[in-house]
Image: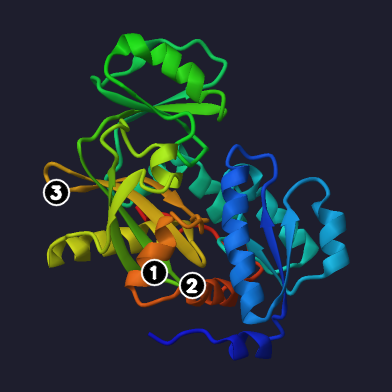
């Protein structure tokens, strides 16, 4: 695998990099951890790097720095849902990660799942509830147990495993603190498998085994060292690996993903990979999965950052997802 070099980036005039993180997202603190890792690595490589808070001061502070590239270490909220991407388009600053439309659809689980289902990819049975409306457990046509989660949030914030309909109302209220819509989905027993793509090529997959004290892959499982066990590469047969690669590439193609993405799937008891969500700005913290998957594909953390920077661009053509032809 040919690696992007420091010389190739500087030859393209990329010397000054703004690392964006934080903001008003519920995942702001996690994103700041990603940003520190990115900043330290890029400064060590010789780039002129400055961190910026992705808040209402960003327009003024970025204009004073004039970066060649904005590196998005943002997670959740406006940093991941296309809002920040649209702002950078207006500022004419190339940025890492996907464009406006892919980011917006990728952040919306129910909308991305609709597209995935159209393309023949397996997704969970799901009921969507608008926060603030009257919730009735009787409207759900499938049986418990359930997973209840915010429709447009990450890091497992507000997610709860529910074993009976009587627990649903409380769980829906909790998830509604984080998102305008709440999803009640079928709980799928199986293996937690996460796969990754970079620059249009499949990198591989990792299996996550949460601590037995945790009910599922929770916030603590993700970000507390030792909170989960990672098996990388995931122990899959050659046929299973090929199928997961196909699903990952198809899901990213449907949304027109750019740069890196990570897919969260459950391999159910029949061996089918059920797609839970797509992450268009995967974390870059010390416990994040994308760097670990990249490492097993032969890429160092700095290699990964260089490739993300190399794919930074504006999306002025307004690319649209590849919709099915009927």
- Pointers 2 and 1 in contact (CB under 8 A)? yes
Instruction: Kindly identify which residue carries mark 2.
Output: 304
- Neighbor class of circle 2 (other Cα within 10 Å; few <14, some 14-19, many 20+) is many
Q: Is residue 99 in view? A: no
Left or right of 228 in this view: 312: right
**Placement of 302 over or under 72, stated as above or below:** below
Left or right of 8 in this view: 229: left
- Pointers 3 and 2 in contact (CB under 8 A)? no
Instruction: Kindly identify which residue carries mark 1.
Output: 294
Q: Earlier in the sequence, mark 2 or mark 1?
A: 1
Q: Is residue 234 in view? A: yes
**Circle number at residue 98:** none
Q: Nearer the viewer, mark 3 or mark 1?
A: 1
How far across and down, in percent of the image, does residue 251 sit? 37, 56
How far across and down, in percent of the image, does residue 74 sit? 61, 52
Q: CA distance from mark 3 to mark 1?
A: 25 Å
Residue that appears at 56% across and 47% down: 30
Q: Earlier in the sequence, mark 3 or mark 1?
A: 3
Q: Quadrant of the N terminus?
A: bottom left
Instruction: Kindly identify which residue carries mark 3.
Output: 271
């Amino acid at each position: 695998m040919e690696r992007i070099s420091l010389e190739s980036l500087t030859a393209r005039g990329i010397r000054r990099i703004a690392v964006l993180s934080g903001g008003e997202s519920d995942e702001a603190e996690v994103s700041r951890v990603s940003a520190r890792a990115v900043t330290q690595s890029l400064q060590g490589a010789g780039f002129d790097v400055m961190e910026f808070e992705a808040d209402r001061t960003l327009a003024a502070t970025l204009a004073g720095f004039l970066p060649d590239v904005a590196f998005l270490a943002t997670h959740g909220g406006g940093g991941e849902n296309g809002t920040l991407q649209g702002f950078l388009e207006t500022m004419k600053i190339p940025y890492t990660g996907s464009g406006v439309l892919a980011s917006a659809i990728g952040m919306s689980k129910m909308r991305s799942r609709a597209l995935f289902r159209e393309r023949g990819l397996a997704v969970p049975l799901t009921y969507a509830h608008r926060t603030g409306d009257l919730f009735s457990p009787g409207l759900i046509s499938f049986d418990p147990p359930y997973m209840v989660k915010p429709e447009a949030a990450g890091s497992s914030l507000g997610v709860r495993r529910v074993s009976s309909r009587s627990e649903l109302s409380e769980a829906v209220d909790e998830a509604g603190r984080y998102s305008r819509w709440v999803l009640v989905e079928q709980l799928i027993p199986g293996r937690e498998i996460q796969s990754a793509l970079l620059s249009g090529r499949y990198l591989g997959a990792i299996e996550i085994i949460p601590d037995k004290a945790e009910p599922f892959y929770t916030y603590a499982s993700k970000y507390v060292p030792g909170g989960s066990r990672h098996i990388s590469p995931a122990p899959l047969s050659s046929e299973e690996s090929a199928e997961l690669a196909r699903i990952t590439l198809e899901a990213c193609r449907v949304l027109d993903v750019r740069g890196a993405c990570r897919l969260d799937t459950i391999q159910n008891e029949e061996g089918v990979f059920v797609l839970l969500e797509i992450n268009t700005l995967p974390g870059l913290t010390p416990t994040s999965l994308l760097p670990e998957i990249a490492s097993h594909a032969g890429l160092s953390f700095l290699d990964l950052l260089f490739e993300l920077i190399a794919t930074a661009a504006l999306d002025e053509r307004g690319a649209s997802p590849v919709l099915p032809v009927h």
